[in-house]
Amino acid sequence: MRRIPIALLLLGLSCADPSPRSGVLYDFETDADLDRIVWNCHTRFSLSTEHASSGSRSLRCDFGEFRYPGISFHDFPADLGDARSISIDLFNDSTSPINLVVRIDDADSGSDHDNRYNGSFLLRPGATSVVIPLEEVRNAPEGRKLDLSKIEQFLIFLYQIEEPVTIYVDRIALK
């Protein structure tokens, strides 16, 4: 029987698909997590020890006044596998409720609002956990099923804000 050197085995493991099929996608524990975010004007992202729901850090998001401030990711998995839901832990640092939208597009979504998933949530002051059943995401487009194996975009954004807002995001996970 031929033995494979451990170094080659480890090299093979490091080349494996890094996108998890289930479990934690983003936990915001290291500076490297900031490189996974798409940066936009009028936003500031930083790691914080405040309002962490998992581990010791969360992502602090300072949003300025513009139409749809939010977060998107460079490496959100294109295939959500056999997960049943996606969960997001959030903390609204203001004294007023905030309107939040989670948008998920597949390869066929295009720019039509009715051809993708747009989930609206009211974030009251304090901690909130948003859980989105993926069956709801799949059935969101009018006249077709959203393909959970061809995800092209995952966004978390705010709308109808009238002044700068700070929210904290932690533990985005597939379940």
Image: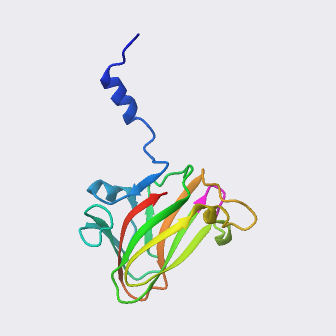
Q: Which residues are magenta?
A: 105-110
Q: How many marks?
A: 0
- Is the stretch drawn in magenta largely helix, strand or loop? loop
Query: Residue at the location (56% across, 58% down)?
Result: 84
Of 40 and 53, nearer the camera is 53
Of 86 and 161, nearer the camera is 86
Query: Residue at the location (40% across, 89% down)?
Result: 96
Q: Residue 150, percent across and down?
A: 60, 51
Q: Residue 10, percent across and down?
A: 34, 30
- Tell me the quarter of the image containing the N terminus: top left
Question: Is 108 within the magenta?
Answer: yes
Judge from the rendering whether residue 94 lies leftward or rightward of residue 97; answer left or right: left
Query: Residue at the location (43% across, 36% down)?
Result: 16
Res 151 quadrant in image: bottom right
Res 144 quadrant in image: bottom right
Where 69 falls versus 82 (above or below)?
below
Q: What colour-coding does the image apply?
A: rainbow
Res 126 quadrant in image: bottom left
